[in-house]
Image (cartoon, rainbow, N blue to C red):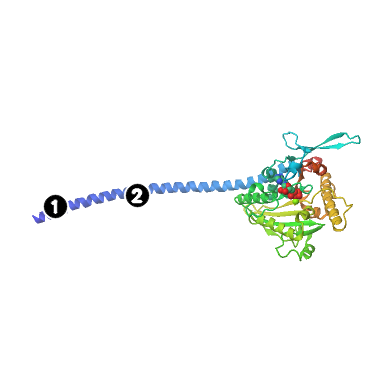
Amino acid sequence: MRLENTVSKQASDQLEIESGSRTLKAKAERLEDILSEREIHIAELEEALASRNCDVSELEAKLRTEETTRRRLHNTVQELKGNIRVFCRVRPLVGEEKAMAGALPLSFPECEEKNEIELSQSSENALGKTTARAFPFKFDRVFAPDSTQDLVFDEVSQLIQSALDGYPVCIFAYGQTGSGKTHTMQGPDAITSARPERKILGIIPRAVQQIYDNTSKLAERGWEYTLEGQFLEIYNETLQDLLVPAGHSAQQGGDRQARLEIYQDSEGHTRVKNITTVAVDSAERVHWLLARAAENRTVAATNCNERSSRSHSVFTLYLRGKNMLTGESSSGVLNLIDLAGSERLSSSGSKGDRLKETQAINKSLSSLGDVIAALAKGSRHVPYRNSKLTHLLQESLGGNSKTLMFVCVNPSPASAQESLCSLQFATKVNSCQIGTAKRQAAA
Ligand code: ADP
Ligand code: MG
């Protein structure tokens, strides 16, 4: 009986084992099917991936050629707009002027291009009769007093792009003292914060920011850039380094200027010997740089504002790019210049240092006008060497360079006569359209 029981238990165990093994086998077969399905799927994915990779490198190559094409087209557009452009910017009335100002001498005729401005001047004749005379002007663009820094920079940013693409670019601010030159180039008087509010910033910090944003995008297309900045001042026809480290300034000032010298490097580029150059390795770096320049200026002069109104300050950024993938390279330079006040300085009454300063300013501003005029006429001889300013900027004026002049205007009635002079100077520059398109037609 016991044996029978055992046998029957074993038989049932056997059945159980057999059925178990059948289930396992079935399971194994199912798994095998799944596995081979997966394998097929993986092979398919690998194939798809390979073809995507192929697409990506094709796209990358396409992107690189498109970048080259973009550079060419961008330059053509800039040349068609003219390699020398003049923008007029009228600042708003500030502080006490608001109360004092009567009817403003400036008006802005409605026009689609927003490029017209009219100055009216009333004068009294011998019989005591007042007559008003209107002087209309037309530039490439006119910015009325309500124009924001944002709006102004929108119009400038294309030229910053040209510098990045490897062209020499000069942007000048011209105008009498207090007309808004420094506001346009840098921003409000002293930016002390390391991260100032964007809306107040002028062209220099915005330009550097734009260059940064662009170089990181261009990195995807194989471009690598190095940026180097220098900041100098031309005072009485001598160059002064505005970036020397703190503590090196006051006493050693004399040595410092004597050491600065304009020369041509082995590649024929105009450079300044012994100047401090700073690697502009972040967009914030430029605020530090502007602050140091302001500090050095204060050390150099008892009255900083007066000093800056009588000297030209030149911020220069060298942009060197190399494309590791295509082997292309580019070398651009961006000069941003805050000129000395253009108020007509009469030499009479000035003596000694003042007379020397006055003569230096008159000479360099008129040299700048002469150089631009000579370029426009296509003269063989361009008198770059007549002033330190034009000598320094030789490479960035003429040829394939791009020049933009802001003529800054103070809107108050008391400045009407000076404003008229500024607008007339700017008109002289503006009639010098030396767009390459024109030059080719003439040849
Ligand atoms: P400049 O450098 O030509 O001597 P500033 O740039 O110092 O002139 O400007 C003179 C004054 O006018 C400054 O107080 C400046 O802040 C102010 N100012 C200039 N332009 C503007 C503007 N567009 N909006 C508001 N204030 C301005
Ligand atoms: Mg200024």
Left or right of 413 on screen, residue 348: right
Q: Residue 372: give its label.
A: none
Left or right of 6 on screen, residue 131: right
Is residue 375 something one can see in this rendering? yes
Left or right of 370 on screen, residue 183: left
Q: Dot 2: within a 10 Å radius of its alpha carbon, few (fewer than 14), some, or many (20 or more) residues?
A: few
Q: Name the residue under label 1.
A: 8
Picture layout, residue 251 above or below residue 344: below
Would you say the residues marked 1 and 2 are in contact, meaning their CB atoms lie under 8 Å apart? no
Q: Dot 1: within a 10 Å radius of its alpha carbon, few (fewer than 14), some, or many (20 or more) residues?
A: few
Picture layout, residue 119 above or below residue 244: above
Which residue type does callout 2 highlight?
Glu
The yes-or-no answer for disc 2 within 8 Å of ligand 1 is no
Residue found 30% across the figure and 49% down from its top: 27
Q: Where is residue 363 in the image (x, y as percent from the top left)?
A: 85, 52
Q: Residue 32: give its label.
A: 2
Q: Is mark 2 on a helix, strand or loop?
A: helix
Mark 1–mark 2 distance (CA, rounded to whole Å): 36 Å
Q: What element carries label 1?
A: helix
Which residue type does callout 1 highlight?
Ser
Residue found 81% across the figure and 55% down from its top: 388
Q: Position of residue 421 (x, y in %)?
A: 83, 43
Quadrant of the drawing holding the N terminus: bottom left
User: Which residue sits furthest right?
Assistant: 126
Left or right of 27 on screen, residue 158: right
Quadrant of the drawing holding the C terminus: top right
Please identify the quarter of the rendering in which residue 88 is found: top right
Q: Where is residue 17 in the image (x, y as percent from the top left)?
A: 22, 52
Is residue 89 something one can see in this rendering? no
